[in-house]
Image (cartoon, rainbow, N blue to C red):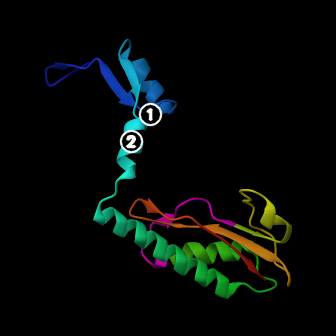
Amino acid sequence: VRRRGADVSRVYALKGDPHADQVARALGNREISDAFPALARLRMVKSAAELELIQRSIDVSIEGHKAAARRIKPGIAEYQLSSTLTSSFLEQGCERPAYRTVVGSGPNSVILHYSQNRRRMDRGDLVLIDAGAECNGYAADITRTLPV
């Protein structure tokens, strides 16, 4: 591989990523080194601007959880709370939830990574909410369990 007159004998990619495998095949006999260790070190240090973006995603996520908590009552469906969270994140200027929102009530509250979000809540249930906002590429992750 030649770039601006230099011979590139080593290329960095995320090992195991399908795109890295495509790069390796396309480059033939070039050495592919794992970029993960270098990226992990870079992610450990945050600038003041990055810390502000992280704080923003946390603040937006907190407000979303508060909005969902105010809406909890018997008869509401899990997907309705999920919708409240997503709507709150978007209304506050974030692009999307950071990951698939989990809202599990009653027996669903103990299922790891529960994703159906269809059950209607009953008085006396507990509801687990795992949700966070992604704002400008920075994410928050908040999990709380509340009574119905």
Name the residue beneath numbered marker 1. 14
Camera-near label (2 vs 1) is: 2
Residue 15 shown left or right of residue 136 in the figure: right
Instruction: Tell me the amino acid under the disc marked 1.
Output: Leu
Q: Quadrant of residue 74?
A: bottom right
Q: Which residues are magenta?
A: 91-102
Which residue is painted at 39% across and 51% down in the image?
44
Residue 41 at x, y = what percent? Answer: 38, 44
User: How many tags in the picture?
Assistant: 2
Q: Is residue 94 magenta?
A: yes
The disc at residue 89 is: none
Q: What separation in Å lies between label 2 and label 1 (alpha carbons)?
A: 9 Å
**Callout 2: SS:** helix
> Which of the marked residues, 2 or 1, is nearer the chain's N terminus?
1
Q: Is residue 40 above or below residue 90?
A: above
Name the residue beneath numbered marker 2. 39
Instruction: Tell me the amino acid under the disc marked 2.
Output: Leu
The majority secondary structure of the magenta stretch comes to loop
Residue 24 shown left or right of residue 142 in the figure: left
Which residue is painted at 64% across and 81% down in the image?
68
Q: Are marks 2 and 1 in contact (CB under 8 Å)?
A: yes
Residue 52 shown left or right of residue 94 in the figure: left
Q: Is residue 26 magenta?
A: no
